[in-house]
């Protein structure tokens, strides 16, 4: 079934993600949260730093840009590596706190915009994707939480790939190749 | 890095999963939780029913079987469809409560066993996988939480596949095919 865009569905998820990650990750042994999937892949902590970065530099800034400038100017490219600024020297606990705070601030700003159904059709210009609507941007904000929850579960599962022994083949998460294209 | 088996890592995750799912899902609009990925795939609520089923019929029963019977007798096969018994007629809120309660009971029983490092090497016989160790079973219990967290994020992302528009290709979770083998 094709779902029309509804802001309340987006907000419902966006407001829950920080608490969900907090409940999953705070105080968890570091073997789960500070290791990666090999090479220069991300640890769970790196993912949280990336989510903080998105709150500061991606979702609400692009929302405002669509409302203010429409398609007249390209979005700033979102530099996924810039998340290091937000993670450097911080413990996972500090990152979880910073994410919750940044998300609450974003949602307060979003609420303050008092968006109308007409606003959702307004468009901006993405440097790689071209013309995109505000509803697509807002839906992507929520889906981006989910893609990183998906990644976090995969990073964590990777840490026990050996110790589960023959069960690995029954565990879908262990067959999941990192499949994000660079954003 | 190969990780040796440590019970505290397993328990650290197992005790957090119910609260994480609760924070993510309780009160969320049903568009996220009651729809599936098409055909006879599972909704998020179905996944929670399956997790409850595992607490009652899989993890601790198999643990006890290894300790009591070793490899002399096959595990009961785990019927993934039997989860319907645990889900039928229940709201997601009731399922989340039941999962938290069942998990707490399991962990209480696990604690009561006072397992030693030697116990982790004890073995049982899985109907499809053959000889498996207790440490493999316990690590799989935690990884099984992760495989379903991974699935839940994918089911939810599926619901906004259309409304994210061109961003879908930047969202790894939307490239993830359901990749679990039947357990």
Image (cartoon, coloured by chain):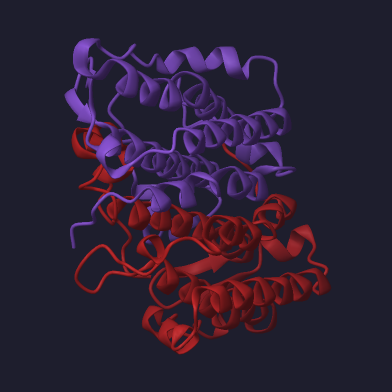
Chain colours: A red, B purple
Q: Residue at x 65, y 77 (%)?
A: A102
Q: Is residue A8 above or below residue A121?
A: above
Residue A97 percent across, percent down from the top left: 63, 75
Q: Is residue B121 above or below residue A34?
A: above
Q: Residue at x 39, y 78 (%)?
A: A80
| Quarter of the image where the N terminus of chain B is located | bottom left
Image check: A149 left or right of B98?
A: left
Question: Can residue B183 be seen?
Answer: no
Residue A21 percent across, percent down from the top left: 56, 59
Q: Which corner quadrant of the image does residue B34 belong to?
A: top right
Q: Is residue A157 above or below residue B166?
A: above
Question: Can residue B94 be seen?
Answer: yes
| Quarter of the image where the C terminus of chain B is located | top left
Q: Which corner quadrant of the image does residue B117 belong to?
A: top left
Residue A123 percent across, percent down from the top left: 60, 70
Image check: A86 left or right of A166?
A: right
Image check: B116 left or right of B152?
A: left
Image check: A112 left or right of B138?
A: right
Q: Residue at x 42, y 78 (%)?
A: A127
Residue A11 percent across, percent down from the top left: 71, 57
Q: Is residue A112 above or below residue B91?
A: below
């Amino acid at each position: 079934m094709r779902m029309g865009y509804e802001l309340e569905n987006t907000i419902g998820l966006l407001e829950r993600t920080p608490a969900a990650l907090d409940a999953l990750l705070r105080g968890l042994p570091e073997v789960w949260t500070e290791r990666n999937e090999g090479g220069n892949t991300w640890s769970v902590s790196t993912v949280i730093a990336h989510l903080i970065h998105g709150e500061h530099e991606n979702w609400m800034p692009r929302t405002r840009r669509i409302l203010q400038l429409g398609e007249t100017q390209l979005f700033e490219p979102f530099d996924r590596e810039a998340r290091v600024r937000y993670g450097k020297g911080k413990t996972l606990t500090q990152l979880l706190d910073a994410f919750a705070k940044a998300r609450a601030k974003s949602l307060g700003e979003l609420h303050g915009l008092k968006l109308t159904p007409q606003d959702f059709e307004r468009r901006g210009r993405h440097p790689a994707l071209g013309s995109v609507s505000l509803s697509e941007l807002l839906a992507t904000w929520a889906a981006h939480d989910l893609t990183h929850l998906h990644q976090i579960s995969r990073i964590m599962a990777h840490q026990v790939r050996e110790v589960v022994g023959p069960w690995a083949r029954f565990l879908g998460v262990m067959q999941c190749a990192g499949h994000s294209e660079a954003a």
